[in-house]
Amino acid sequence: MTQTHTIRRPDDWHLHLRDGDMLRAVLPYTSRDFARAIIMPNLVPPVVTAADARAYRDRIIAAIPGADDFTPLMTLYLTEDTDPADVAAAHADGLIAAVKLYPAGATTNSASGVSDFTKVAAVFDKMAEIGLPLCTHGEVTDADVDIFDREAVFIDRVLEPIRRDHPGLRVVMEHITTSDAVDYVKTGDTNLAATITTHHLVINRNHILAGGIKPHYYCLPVAKRETHRLALRAAATSGDSWFFLGTDSAPHTDANKLLPCGCAGCFTAPNTMSILAEVFEQDGALDRLEAFTSLNGPAFYGLPPNEATLTLIREMPDYPAHIDTADGPVTVFDPAMPLNWSV
Ligand code: DOR
Ligand code: ZN
């Protein structure tokens, strides 16, 4: 039995680091294992302008533990007032790697997102022209659409029309949760890719709802039924270049999770690589882990893969059940299965 497994150092193509004390508490778990991460801009207030992104990048860099080699890849939060020229300048400066689309009201701190897509058409045109990827939170927010159908409906009602109207726009469907999204991305258009989270490879909706409600498994998009989880596993472990890791590690304090109206998010940064090694080994695909975590993402974003390596050792990982932050404890995602690989 293989006892060690070495891959190029991974990147996380979708990460929430928050700000202030929370940033300082959670960043070391990512910078220990990952070389780069696409940083989500849904702060309060959101990261809307190039100036916001520059200041946030400086705060992140100041919080990186001294020994770690980590590069934050910044994003701008798309609003109906986003200026295409500001986006183009931020891209030309090498400041941003993508723009993030939140449909207004879709998730945590998305109130400033987009309701009227005609108002962001000029931004999409500029992004298509300069080759800057659009990262999408792919869910509609219509009250009459069932929450379990919101991703599939987004593809038909929102994403397909945007891509038709803005040919050449590069799109990452983030944190996909359905076989519908897997099939859509698999059509093989070179301008389309998807990230898959660690937790959506492990949990289905029963984990959230069966035998008592489990707020720590509640995230958005919400985990779907088992057939969808299996489609995600097949996509991630396929090695197919259009699928890559975006953990969506999203820390919230227990106080904010365990409420009558609790926050969405799973905090997976501390144990993501151990969980992924387990998942890929279970599916006989350990040799394709590197494609998912370290090769496919850079290829889509037009960046070189990392030269440094990460070695997994067959050994039970040691990670805390929760981490302490100045705002209170944050619970680490429980994969609900024994893990056999440590970084
Ligand atoms: O579960 C989630 N948490 N999904 C999101 O889209 C946002 C994130 C957060 O910021 O907490
Ligand atoms: Zn997210």
Image (cartoon, rainbow, N blue to C red):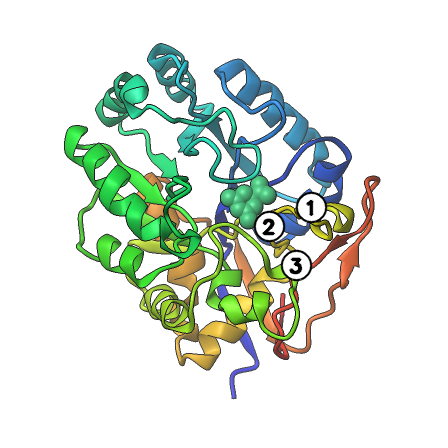
**Mark 1 or 3, nearer chain start:** 3
Determine which quarter of the picture holds residue 237: bottom left
Residue 178 higher or lower than 174, as above or below: below
Whether the residue carrying mark 1 lies under 8 Å from ligand 1 is answered with yes
Image coordinates of residue 235 in percent, x first then y, are 33, 65
Residue at the image position 76 percent from the left and 51 percent from the top: 254
Of 215 and 42, which appears nearest the observer? Answer: 215
Image coordinates of residue 130 in percent, x first then y, are 26, 23
Q: Are marks 1 and 3 in contact (CB under 8 Å)?
A: no
Mark 2 closeness class: few <14, some 14–19, many ≥20 residues within 10 Å = many
Q: Which residue is mark 2?
A: 265
Image coordinates of residue 89 in percent, x first then y, are 39, 14
Image coordinates of residue 51 in percent, x first then y, are 54, 14
Instruction: Give the amino acid at mark 2.
Output: Gly
Q: Which residue is mark 1?
A: 252
Instruction: Give the amino acid at mark 1.
Output: His
For marks 3 and 2, give the CA distance.
Answer: 7 Å
Disc 3 element: helix
For marks 2 and 1, give the CA distance.
Answer: 7 Å
